[in-house]
Amino acid sequence: MKEKLQQIKLAAQAELEKLCDADQLEQFKVKYLGKKGELTAILRSMSGISAEERPIIGQLANQIRSEIETLVDEKRTLLAESAMKHKLEAEKIDVTIPGKKRPLGHTHPVTSTAREIEKIFINMGFDVVDGPEIEYVSNNFDALNAPDNHPSRDMTDTFYINPEILLRTQTSPVQARIMRDNKPPIRVICPGRVYRSDEVDATHSPMFHQMEGLVVDKNIVMGDLKGTLEVFAKNMFGNDTRIRFRPHHFPFTEPSAEVDISCFVCGGKGCRLCKGEGWIEILGAGMVHPNVLRNCGIDPEEYSGFAFGMGIERIAMRKYNIDDLRLLYENDMRFLSQF
Ligand code: DAH
């Protein structure tokens, strides 16, 4: 009996050495210490042992049992330590490896141009306001003094949703909204998309962006318009920039003008960018027509104002020397990443 117990102990020790994870240790425990385990079997069979030997064998069996239990505990600690060590090793991170660079985008040149324009006017005390792209015909044309026979009202030039509603052809209807809803002094710029039934080519697109400007107050004169646009031109295109007003016609302004800036590449001598002219057209402007003020609930005897409108793409194209409008809409990264 004693030898058998010693054998069990030796076998257990040898087996324990080879165990390499917690599952195996569990199976080992069942095999040696469990209810159906080898030691239990021996203790069960003690009935066949003489009365003198019984306590000795019993004591030895219990001693071996507790030895094995101690070994199991030690092994458990060892296994846990080595499992943790493996885990730490597997999860080791090298904080000195350089990080992966994520490609970072930037604003589209049309957006950055719009923001640049906004900033210049904000610095002059203007507010930036919004208007809807789906607009009433009455705001887009009638309030702005555009007669029924004006060519821009034609079905072939304008996207009508129904006879009263259209995709705005200009940002000018925001003028009407602002004048109706606010008392002068008014000083706003309104950036946004506009729509016209144009074929796509190097200088046309059925959708593009405009920036409208409107100032209404007492004693506003053409000199205020000129001064404001000059500050804008110098800030946008460089301090040496000069501006030039050419007489023009817009239904909503009287007098009206087209405004040119001196070419910022050649300074006015004539070059490829300005097509030898020395001047580049950038916007339309004028003094708000008394009819427009009246249509929007402002007394033209008391107040006067000026307005202007520019194409944002056109400004971007001039500023960055882009010769084809379509480049701005194609989202080709080779083009866009230059800005
Ligand atoms: N709305 C005009 C256009 O789309 C641009 C314009 C010209 C706006 C003169 C104005 C202005 O406010 O005074 O061509």
Image: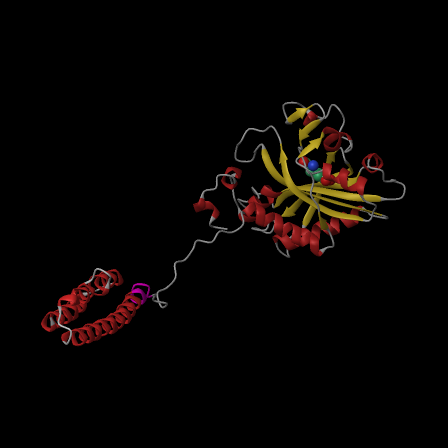
Return the x and y of residue 12 as percentages of the image width and height.
16, 68
Q: Residue furthest right?
A: 301
Return the x and y of residue 51 as percentages of the image width and height.
15, 73
Any part of residue 246 in sight: no
Residue at 59% x, 35% y: name it.
207
> Ligand 1 is found in which quarter of the picture?
top right
Q: What is the span of residues highlighted in magenta in the rendered image? A: 87-92
- 208 vs 85, left or right, is right
Nearer to the camera, 223 or 29: 29
Return the x and y of residue 335 as percentages of the image width and height.
46, 45
Quarter of the image for residue 174 reads top right
Any part of residue 215 in sight: yes
Magenta-colored segment: predominant secondary structure: helix
In magenta segment, residue 117: no
Q: Split into 4 quadrants, where in the image is the N terminus?
A: bottom left
Up the image or down, 285 lies above or below 158; here it is below
- 128 vs 298, left or right, is left
Residue at 64% x, 43% y: name it.
282
Return the x and y of residue 261 as percentages of the image width and height.
65, 47
Nearer to the camera, 337 or 314: 337
- 339 vs 280, left or right, is left
